[in-house]
Amino acid sequence: MTWPAPDWSQPWFGPYAAPGARVRLACEAGSSLPDALATHVPHGAEPGWPGPRFVEQSALPAGVAYESHIFATGDVPTRDGLHDFFNGLVWHRFPLTKRRLNQLQAAEIDRAGVQQVRGPVRDGITLFDENAILLQAPQAIWAALAQRQWQRLFIELRPLWSHVRVVLFGHALLEKLVNPYKSITGHVHLSGVPAWVGDDLAAWDRWLAGQLDAAHLAQKPFTPLPVLGVPGWWPASQDTGFYDDVQVFRPARAVPSRTGQGAANPV
């Protein structure tokens, strides 16, 4: 095993830290990543479904789409490395949502085949799978985020962040944050997790899986969030000048309105 060890004390890894540390230790002791995921991370998602089964990448038959194979067999081909390591952790933390994304991918492949260009549905699913952020927050936070009013979001409204919960879903996003840098940006799913869902991530998973369909994801219902701007997540963000970097904290672009006047809208 040559991939680096995540710093599990970092807040962005919080939901994955305990099982991730167990899997990492098992791999260091000589276990394969599929075996470590199967042995050291809790299984089970709902009655009648035992959850995903992790197998070696070589189990994927030649010419068979990865998503179609998972849908048909329940087996998740897994390569050694951080990308599939985090994919496995997200499967176990959000099994129903990952299963739903896989169902939608497989249905689209069955409908249109594997094309050179994915198309809007598969693009939206892939963006969610790789880079999504889940957010539970007061409305004022949502409003500032949607308009990319970064100074208001992170400085004026900073006291409100004690009522915000940010959970990273995208496994590619988690992989990037093993070596964090300022410009890492995720995509916040615009269907914010309602307060009534509560704090339990299993409840988040059940709720989220019920929100996702092809038409919704084809619209790419996301807005960008530079992850290290989250208050308390990165020491440099204590300096308010951190947010003045317009190469990272980009303003909303002006989109012409029907009257011909410019309107600042996030795009």
Image (tube, rainbow, N blue to C red):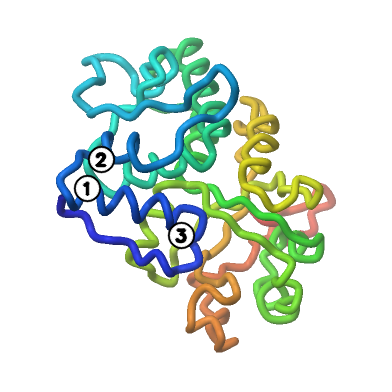
Q: Position of residue 265 (x, y in %)?
A: 71, 57
User: Is residue 189 visible in this depiction of the protein?
Assistant: yes
| 108 on left or right of 31 | right
Which residue is painted at 53% across and 53% down in the image? 168
Closer-to-camera residue (236/59) = 59
Identify which residue, 137 or 154, lies in the foreground. 137
Judging from the image, what secondary structure is the residue with disc 3 in?
helix
Depth order, front residue of 29/175: 29
Label pair 2/1, CB-CB below 8 angstroms: yes
- Residue lying furthest right: 259
Q: Is residue 221 above or below residue 118?
A: below
Q: Earlier in the sequence, mark 2 or mark 1?
A: 1
The amino acid on which the numbered mark 2 sits, given as a three-letter code, is Leu
- Tell me the element at label 1: helix
Crowdedness of circle 2 by 10 Å Cα count: few (<14), some, many (20+)?
many
Q: Residue 116's image quarter?
A: top left
Numbered badge on residue 13: 3
Which badge, 3 or 2, is on the more N-terminal residue? Answer: 3
Q: Name the residue tied to disc 2.
A: 33
Which residue shows up at 54% across the image and 47% down it? Answer: 132
Q: Callout 3: few (<14), some (14-19), or many (20+) C-alpha neighbours within 10 Å?
A: some
Residue at point 17%, 50% (across, down): 29
Please, what secondary structure does the residue beneath circle 2 have? helix
User: Which mark is on residue 207?
Assistant: none
Which residue matches tag 1?
27
Image coordinates of residue 234 in percent, x first then y, are: 49, 77
